[in-house]
Amino acid sequence: MKKILLFTPRQWNLQWGQEKDLINQINTHYKIKVIDLFDYSDLPNTYSIPKNTELVIRKTNTKPGLLLGIKTEIQNAKQALKSDFNIMITYLTAGTILASIISRIRGKKVLLIYADDYPELNRNSSYVGYLLTKYFANPILALMSNKIVATARLLAKDISIMGKKAEKIPNGVHIESYTSDKKIKNNNYTVGFVGGFGEWLDFDLIINAAKKLPAVNFVLVGDGPQFNYVKKQTKQLKNVRLTGMIPKDEVVKEIDSMSVCTIPFKVNRLTDRVSPIKLFEYWAREKPVISTSFLELKETGENIVEFADSKDDFLNKILLLENLKLRNEIGEKGKKEVKKYDWSSLGKRYLKILGDL
């Protein structure tokens, strides 16, 4: 059985992500050694380790910054030197430069999966990091890679270099894990959100609607940088429930309790390059979706998603979808559309790429 060395884009126990879905699709064909990002928060063990998979957890007291970046680059290079593998898969650009060079020198193949706009993610925290990622790390990794996959159209354009074009494979959902005949019945009209409370979310759209629609229930599932802000703003609202972080197997139950699901992203360069997994999770449970009109989702959800970019529009879409017949019609469209984004199909595309490598 061929072997893969995989560098993750997030700490394994931080949250569910694309890399875990990918591993679960390819680990019947490959043995996979997963090199986790350094864990500086001492995260509890949350997710199990798939079959044919070895997980290397690395703890550190070093906080994010230049020092941790250098440490990551050096330690990942050591893994590329000592590990037995045929193909290196990385979701990182900065952090696996040396590892990719070493892999190529050793005659190994390199697959870069570009799933986020890393320069833009770095811009607010470190402008130096933004410049280094955009003009140094990204081009080197693209050149060192035998194959590049991007999860969004603009990401594919950004990472393509010198005639080397990235192939777009969007994010998706393992539909089978979201299939259940036991659906929670909720007679109360409920608007919900599931995901990380990142800085790229405009929670004011939901908070405003919750204040003006006291008869509507709102459920927000997840945690992250904006959690305390949302908690403070909704403290006096009896129609808002915050769950915090919950196990993945409970997410389906929460989605089922929602009449309408939302993706309230700020519309900017970063979000225009996001293929949101939560859209496919919502669709898999036949839920109508209200979203802001960032580019990738606007293309994916055309004629199915209800788009709203202002507080008034967002509120009006919530009122519009009080109509049960309309919700059911839209939910059925989403259920049909999500079949294109099932990991059973996406996994075959990745297996072909790995087979060609």
Image: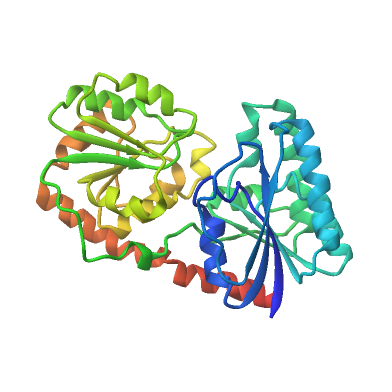
Q: Residue at position x 44%, y 34% from top?
A: 197
Which residue is nearer to you in this view: 211 or 329?
211
| Residue 295 percent coordinates (x, y) | 45, 44
Q: Is residue 73 above or below residue 170?
A: above
Instruction: Tell me: 288 left or right of 68.
Output: left
Q: Is residue 314 above or below residue 299?
A: above
Question: Looking at the image, can residue 357 be seen?
Answer: no
| Residue 34 percent coordinates (x, y) | 67, 59
| Residue 353 percent coordinates (x, y) | 63, 72
Question: Looking at the image, can residue 255 be seen?
Answer: yes
Which residue is nearer to you in this view: 40 or 79?
40
Instruction: Tell me: 321 left or right of 302.
Output: left
Residue sticking out furthest to the bottom: 1
Instruction: Tell me: 290 left or right of 154.
Output: left
Instruction: Tell me: 347 left or right of 111.
Output: left
Q: Residue at position x 49%, y 39% from top?
A: 271
Q: Quadrant of residue 234?
A: top left
Q: Residue at position x 71%, y 72% from top?
A: 3
Q: Quadrant of residue 231?
A: top left
Q: Is residue 236 above or below residue 302?
A: above
Instruction: Give the position of the C terminus as an image quadrant.
Output: bottom right
Instruction: Give the position of the N terminus as an image quadrant.
Output: bottom right
Q: Residue at position x 24%, y 27% from top?
A: 209
Q: How many marks?
A: 0
Which residue is nearer to you in this view: 263 or 59?
59
| Residue 84 percent coordinates (x, y) | 79, 69
